[in-house]
Amino acid sequence: QEQLVESGGGLVQAGDSLRLSCEASERTFVTWAMGWFRRAPGKDREFVAAINWYDRKTYYADSVKGRFTISGDNAKNTVYLQMNDLKPEDTAAYYCTAATDGGLTYADSVYEYDYWGQGTQVTVSS
C-alpha cells in the first residue's frame, strides 16, 4: 500500500520559515506530479502548490506566490515545500498529495490526485 509521509510542521512566529517534506513509502510508486493542499479549522481544503515532474512546471495558489517554493526529486518520489514569511493565515494542516495517472491539467483540483498523506500541522502565531 503506497503511502505519503509528511514531516516538518511545527509552531512558528509570523515572518519565520518552515520546510515541509513528503516522501512516498514505496520507491516503486510512480508519480506524475506531487503537490500540497492545506485545511484550516472550519474551512475547506485548499490548493497550495504542485509540481509536474515531466516538465518541472510549478503551480501556486495566489495567497502563497512569492513566499512558498515547491521542489522535489521525482526519482525519489519526494517533494518539499519551502515556506517563507509565514503569516497567521497560513495556519493549517498541510497535506501532501500525488498524481499517478498522468500529468496535471487542473493542478488546484483535488480530483487530479490519487494519494494523500496524513497531514502535518503548521501553526503561525502573530
Image (cartoon, rainbow, N blue to C red):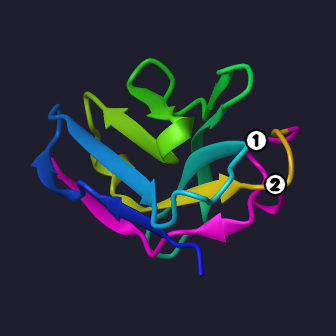
Tell me the residue that label 2 is attached to: 112
Q: Is residue 118 above or below residue 110?
A: below
Instruction: Tell me which residue sits at (68%, 42%) in the image.
Output: 33
Q: CA distance from mark 1 to mark 2?
A: 7 Å
Q: Are marks 1 and 2 in contact (CB under 8 Å)?
A: yes
Residue 73 within the segment the image draws in magenta = no
Over which residues does the magenta segment extend?
105-126
Answer with left or right where residue 33 lies relative to residue 24: right
Answer with left or right where residue 76 lies relative to residue 91: right
Which comes sooner in the sequence, label 1 or label 2?
1
- Tell me the kind of residue under disc 1: Ala
What is the crowding at mark 1: few (fewer than 14 residues within 10 Å), some, or many (at least 20)?
many
Instruction: Tell me which residue sits at (76%, 41%) in the image.
Output: 107
Q: Where is the N terminus found, in terms of image quarters?
A: bottom right
The numbered dot on residue 107 is 1
Residue 110 within the segment the image draws in magenta = yes
Instruction: Tell me which residue sits at (58%, 46%) in the image.
Output: 35
